Image: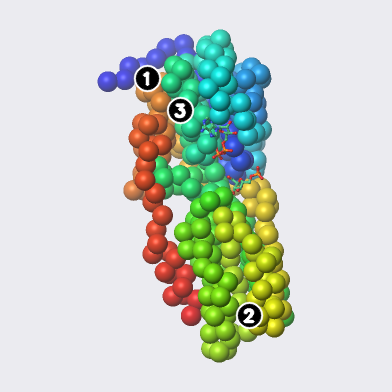
């Protein structure tokens, strides 16, 4: 049974790609820590800042007016040294010198692996899933996903207007790394005729055959969403135009999907998960992930979380196909 801790000091860092809602996590962590009488330190630029000891104590006033802001006030980075044994040992040493009783890491799968490495060197880590990709098997939600889907869906809606006016085909590439969640959600919510994901890549011939079928049914414009894990949206657009003679344009949405105001859903998950991470440290829990499962926020052991199996739902892909008729 975990025992409540006294005179604690904790650190918080954001790592990997930024995600809307990371600021709401930082706010929740600082405010919850203050509530529990814990001193909290913000670590700049992810693991990079940990190496450099680039940290500053934070107070509730430091996190005023950030709940609605995109990005992360602590900054973030990808830090190659952290992937090496030597780097991990050094980072853990810094955490010990800084006398951190707990380290809260908000980031994706890679950041969690970094945290796991630190835990093996005796650092107590609490991980909060934050990535627009939703590509983490241990949780049904990652902070930033909803905002990214909404941003991309807005952009797709704009593209749809012009595509419809010109009776063109539009190919829109969205982020998501090696996973198709973002593309699937963008496809369904954007009313796409076809979605290409790493899990269902589809070849160019099948896409062209589908467009022909759609034309035969009277559809004058087509919207194809492509996940970055499939890529090749420019080449696909050129091939559609070459084979079918239908004007086709491709758009890669890129980093605009990572910016912007977090949605209320992201702020909510961020606030609850940030609070839970601090409470867990206060209660003496060690090396956990704050996950969202079956409609509830829950603590998982980091080991269990990193060995979880995929939750990809093939039904969602089927729904896209059916609704595109
Ligand atoms: P995300 O956390 O969004 O998945 P990355 O995969 O880029 O983003 O990981 C963020 C950082 O986490 C990396 O720059 C690195 O510092 C650390 N990291 C990634 N993979 C590992 C690993 N296998 N072991 C230790 N640290 C890692
Ligand atoms: O993990 C978030 C993400 O935006 C992915 O969707 C994308 O593959 C990657 O980060 C892009 O990384 P960077 O900002 O380093 O180009």
> Which residue position is annotated with label 1?
284
Q: Which mark is residue 152?
A: none
Q: Is residue 193 visible?
A: no
State the CA–CA distance, disc 2 to disc 1.
Answer: 58 Å
Q: Write the residue at 64% across / 26% down.
A: 48
Residue 29 at x, y percent in the picture: 52, 29
Label 2 crowd (10 A; few <14 / some 14-19 / many >=20): many
Q: Is residue 92 visible?
A: yes
Please state which of residues 199 and 320 is positioned toward the viewer in this rendering: 199
Picture quarter with ligand 1:
top right
- Mark 3 or mark 1: whose residue is earlier in sequence: 3
Q: Write the residue at 67% across / 58% down.
A: 253
> Which quadrant does the N terminus fall into?
top left
- Mark 3 secondary-structure assignment: helix
The quadrant holding residue 254 is bottom right
The quadrant holding residue 58 is top right
- Mark 2 or mark 3: whose residue is earlier in sequence: 3
């Amino acid at each position: 049974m975990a025992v409540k801790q006294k005179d604690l000091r904790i650190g918080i860092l954001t790592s990997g790609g930024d995600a809307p809602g990371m600021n709401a996590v930082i706010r929740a962590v600082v405010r919850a820590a203050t509530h529990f009488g814990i001193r909290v330190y913000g670590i700049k630029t992810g693991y990079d800042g940990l190496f450099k000891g680039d940290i500053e104590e934070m107070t509730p006033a430091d996190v005023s007016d950030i709940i609605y802001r995109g990005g992360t006030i602590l900054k973030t980075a990808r830090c190659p040294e952290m992937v090496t044994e030597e780097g991990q040992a050094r980072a853990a040493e810094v955490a010990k010198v800084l006398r951190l009783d707990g380290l809260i890491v908000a980031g994706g799968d890679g950041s969690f692996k970094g945290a796991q490495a630190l835990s093996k060197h005796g650092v107590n880590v609490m991980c909060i899933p934050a990535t627009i990709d939703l590509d983490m098997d241990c949780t049904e939600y990652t902070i930033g996903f909803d905002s990214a889907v909404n941003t991309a869906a807005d952009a797709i809606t704009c593209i749809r207007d012009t595509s419809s006016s010109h009776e063109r085909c539009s190919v829109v590439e969205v982020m998501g790394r090696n996973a198709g969640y973002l593309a699937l959600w963008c496809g369904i919510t954007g009313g796409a005729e076809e979605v290409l994901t790493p899990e269902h890549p589809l070849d160019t011939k099948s896409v062209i055959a589908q467009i022909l079928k759609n034309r035969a049914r009277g559809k004058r414009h087509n919207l194809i969403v492509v996940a970055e894990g499939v890529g090749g949206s420019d080449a696909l657009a050129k091939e559609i135009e070459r084979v079918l003679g239908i004007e086709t344009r491709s758009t890669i949405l890129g980093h605009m999907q990572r910016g912007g105001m977090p949605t209320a859903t992201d702020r909510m998950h961020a606030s609850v998960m940030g609070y839970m991470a601090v409470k867990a440290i206060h209660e003496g829990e060690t090396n956990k992930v704050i996950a969202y499962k079956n409609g509830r926020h829950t603590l998982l052991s980091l080991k269990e979380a990193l060995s979880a199996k995929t939750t990809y739902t093939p039904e969602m892909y089927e729904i896209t196909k059916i609704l595109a008729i």
